[in-house]
Image (tube, rainbow, N blue to C red):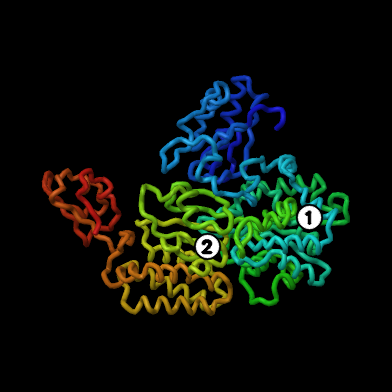
């Protein structure tokens, strides 16, 4: 980058690519050539900046100006105004939802102020397809120091001392897992990277692999050195084509540089990495199910012990960590375990990456210190609730987690506090809900996903979740009975206690947490046959206010089932028996005469 005066960093993550960021780059190149600036300005396609709600996003360096919602047509104006004339394009600057003022420097945006990026340290800063840019930011320096200066046990002690816990959801101490695998005697051992991220709305691991694949390769090699393995396997779902493409490029580059393969960095250590594809089964996020899938078997979990550290892939000792866990490893060795422990709180060290989604102003990928409160994430980083609506709940941990309410907003985000509150960390999904969301329907949505993703091996999960889902369907359809609420809760607790693996054991969490915090909504659905949030179609009824209806006939013309009748210039009526509750009439009415009850 040294010879260029300015750099234009353009996000080439999956989200921004879908919004034409590749065309933006092409237009930038054309505009620079037309202004004879191609030798002064470098365009860098990077990984995800995290600010997905406002994508495509670009950053101007060195002044750090951050442009959002950029279209291909904006490229020429940015070059002429920002680079040639030295003026910011104000209409493309981020507008703070609270102050309503433009913020030009990303360092002063509320979205970034409270973030500390460790796992995401290179995402948005380097070209993920260029190993030299990774090396320029101390890439592979950790691997070099470990191989040349430490014994395997000394390196494991560094990871243990850092108190890094697994970021895939279980929170098991990473260093201890490495040590257990190292102590297992075998002629062959394996390092496995779990990139099977399957939570609805989760894209943390995908973004790391798309934006900084070498950090994961380096960490896997360090793990291989520590536990005595010479083969690494990345298990990634086939729905991540861009992450797969960049992993392939990174693996080949690392081999070409002697950072993977035989006698790495002139040592006697041999280690190489291969990729295996998953078909997108949520249960394969569980390590034993993942291993079976890698072996070509049905992705079903098995009872532990034996743990994979003793008998895993092909019956050999296997260490399984997820993408985010591995991404934390190189910085720990470069900056020290003591540095890592200064971030976070007493029982949960470091940071956690979350996919912040739902009804917040700033949707995107964030990384915050452990112990940051939900309030800080939702209202400071997330910018508050969209359209001035009232916060209702936040679902953490995906289908395995639970819904937390306003009384939980000051809960520190860490493994233990979230579990104590009735939810869990999970892999990092975080969906914010507002006053318009029906909590019974939210529970049904997550359980519907779990039923679909269950491997079917154990009866509590296979049958119990199906019966529980049927009860929720019955309740949201207005056919619930008084005893259904009691049966639902009892069944949820039985499934939680008797399922074989983590999928079944945590599947009732969305139901139990919503029942604990929003029982009045369940009662309203069953007893009053009403949905307080007006989201369950079977419980809704459209009506026309005769005092507001002017008889324009627009509602009757857009009704697909002819459920609205009335003469022109006279109040109309809706036949509830014919109405399919599509909402087309309410959407088209210009006089506010149609309402839900």
Image quadrant of residue 274? bottom right
Label 1: how many residues lie within 10 Å, few (<14), some (14-19) or many (20+)? Answer: many
Q: Secondary structure at mark 2?
A: loop
Q: CA distance from mark 2 to mark 1?
A: 33 Å
Q: Which residue is mark 2?
A: 397
Horizontally, is 529 left or right of 424 in the view? left
Image quadrant of residue 416? bottom right
| Total numbered badges shown on the rendered structure | 2
Kindly report which numbered mark, 2 or 1, lies closer to the viewer in this rendering: 2
Q: Which residue is mark 1?
A: 272
Residue at the spot x=47%, y=77% of the render? 493
User: How far from the left and from the top, in percent, is residue 181?
Assistant: 75, 68
The residue lying toward the viewer, choosing from 350 and 69, is 350
Q: Quadrant of the N terminus?
A: top right
The residue lying toward the viewer, choosing from 194 and 376, is 376
User: How far from the left and from the top, in percent, is residue 252?
Assistant: 75, 47
- Relative to 63, is 253 above or below? below
The residue lying toward the viewer, choosing from 580 and 502, is 502
- Relative to 595, is 5 above or below? above
Residue at the spot x=65%, y=56% of the render? 342
User: How far from the left and from the top, in percent, is residue 545?
Assistant: 16, 52
Q: Quadrant of the C terminus?
A: bottom left
Q: Secondary structure at mark 1?
A: strand
- Relative to 470, is 369 above or below? above
């Amino acid at each position: 980058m040294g010879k260029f005066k300015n750099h234009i960093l353009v996000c080439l993550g999956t989200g921004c690519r879908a919004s034409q960021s590749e065309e933006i780059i092409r237009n930038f190149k054309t505009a620079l050539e037309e202004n004879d600036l191609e030798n002064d300005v470098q365009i860098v396609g990077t990984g995800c900046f995290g600010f997905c709600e406002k994508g495509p996003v670009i950053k101007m360096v060195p002044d750090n100006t951050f442009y959002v919602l950029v279209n291909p047509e904006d490229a020429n104006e940015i070059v002429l105004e920002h680079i040639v004339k030295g003026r910011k394009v104000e209409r493309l600057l981020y507008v703070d939802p609270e102050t309503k003022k433009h913020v030009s420097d990303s360092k002063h945006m509320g979205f970034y102020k409270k973030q500390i990026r460790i796992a995401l340290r290179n995402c948005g800063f380097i070209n993920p397809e260029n190993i030299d840019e990774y090396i320029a930011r101390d890439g592979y320096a950790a691997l070099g120091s470990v191989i040349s200066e430490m014994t395997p046990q000394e390196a494991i002690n560094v990871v243990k001392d850092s108190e890094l816990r697994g970021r895939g959801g279980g929170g098991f101490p990473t260093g201890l897992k490495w040590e257990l695998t190292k102590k297992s005697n075998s002629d062959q051992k394996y390092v496995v990277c779990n990139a099977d991220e399957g939570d609805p709305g989760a894209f943390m691991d995908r973004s790391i692999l798309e934006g900084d694949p070498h950090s994961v390769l380096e960490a896997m090699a360090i793990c291989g050195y520590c536990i005595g393995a010479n083969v690494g396997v990345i298990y990634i779902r086939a729905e991540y084509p861009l992450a797969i493409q960049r992993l392939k490029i990174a693996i080949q580059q690392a081999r070409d540089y002697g950072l993977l393969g035989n006698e790495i960095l002139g040592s006697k250590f041999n280690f190489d990495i291969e990729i295996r594809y998953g078909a997108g089964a949520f249960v394969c996020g569980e390590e034993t199910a993942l291993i079976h899938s890698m072996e070509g078997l049905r992705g079903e979990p098995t009872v532990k012990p034996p743990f994979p550290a003793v008998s895993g892939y092909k019956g050999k000792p296997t260490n399984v960590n997820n993408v985010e866990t591995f991404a934390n490893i190189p910085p720990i060795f470069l900056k020290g375990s003591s540095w890592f422990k200064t971030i976070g709180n007493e029982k949960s060290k470091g940071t956690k990456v979350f996919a912040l989604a739902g009804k917040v102003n700033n949707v995107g990928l964030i990384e915050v210190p452990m112990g940051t409160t939900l309030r800080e994430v939702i209202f400071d980083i997330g910018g508050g609730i969209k359209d001035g609506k009232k916060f209702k709940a936040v679902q953490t941990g995906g289908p395995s987690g639970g819904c937390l309410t306003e009384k939980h907003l000051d809960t520190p985000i860490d493994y233990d506090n979230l579990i104590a509150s009735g939810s869990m960390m999970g892999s990092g999904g975080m969906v914010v809900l507002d006053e318009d969301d029906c909590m019974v329907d939210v529970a049904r949505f997550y359980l519907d996903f779990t039923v679909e993703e269950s491997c079917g091996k154990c009866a509590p999960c296979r049958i119990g979740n199906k019966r529980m889902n049927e009860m929720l369907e019955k309740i949201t359809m207005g056919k619930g009975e008084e005893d259904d609420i009691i049966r639902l809760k009892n069944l949820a607790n039985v499934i939680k206690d008797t399922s074989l693996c983590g999928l079944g054991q945590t599947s009732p969490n969305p139901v139990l947490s919503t029942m604990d915090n929003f029982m009045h909504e369940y009662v309203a659905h069953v007893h009053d046959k009403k949905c307080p949030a007006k989201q369950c179609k079977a419980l809704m009824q459209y009506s026309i206010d005769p005092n507001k209806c002017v008889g324009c006939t627009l509602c009757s013309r857009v009704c697909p089932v002819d459920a609205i009748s009335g003469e022109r210039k006279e109040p109309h009526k809706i036949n509830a028996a014919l109405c399919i509750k599509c909402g087309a009439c309410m959407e088209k009415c210009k006089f506010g005469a149609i309402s839900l009850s």
